[in-house]
Image (cartoon, grey):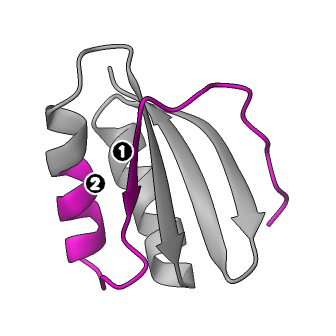
Amino acid sequence: MSARPSTADPGQTIDITGEVCPMTFVRTKLRLERLQPGEILSVRLRGEEPLRNVPKAASDEGHVILGIVTDGNDHIVTIRRR
């Protein structure tokens, strides 16, 4: 996967590297719901399944994926709340 850097500054961060699907998106969704529209969430995750599912599920709910970058064994997904 190619890294797409994000220039957006996340207002909130969440580390779900210890979670497994479907809890990865459940935790992400709960955090997104606490944000105001337009605010940005940075999600640190680990594994191929969360990397596929979290951005897709967030996008399906209308949120905007601003970028995905690789950080060692983890990925950081930056999401703007709709």
Quarter occupied by residue 65: top right
The earlier-in-sequence mark between 1 and 2 is: 2
Do tag 1 and tag 2 residues touch (Cβ < 8 Å)? yes
**Circle 1 or circle 2, nearest the eye:** 2
Q: Secondary structure at mark 2?
A: helix
Above or below 37: residue 49: below
In the rendered view, does 52 fall on the left or right side of 2? left
On residue 32, which mark appears?
none
Q: Secondary structure at mark 1?
A: helix
**Image point (21%, 45%), residue name:** 31
**Image point (56%, 51%), residue name:** 77
- Residue underneath mark 2: 28
**Image point (75%, 65%), residue name:** 70
Q: Which residue type does callout 1 highlight?
A: Ala
Which residues lie in the magenta part?
A: 1-29
Q: Quadrant of the C terminus?
A: top left
In the rendered view, does 70 fall on the left or right side of 77? right
What's the magenta bit mostly, secondary-structure-wise? Answer: loop
* Residue 39, horizontal then vertical, whole percent: 38, 20
Magenta span has 11? yes
Crowd tier of the residue under label 2, counting other residues whose Cα lies within 10 Å: few below 14, some 14–19, many 20 or above: many
- Residue underneath mark 1: 58
Crowd tier of the residue under label 1, counting other residues whose Cα lies within 10 Å: few below 14, some 14–19, many 20 or above: many
Nearer the observer, 70 or 53: 70
In the rendered view, does 62 fall on the left or right side of 7? left
* Residue 43, horizontal then vertical, whole percent: 46, 54
Counting every numbered tag in the picture gives: 2
Above or below 78: residue 75: below
Q: Which residue type does callout 2 highlight?
A: Thr
Furthest-right residue in view?
A: 2
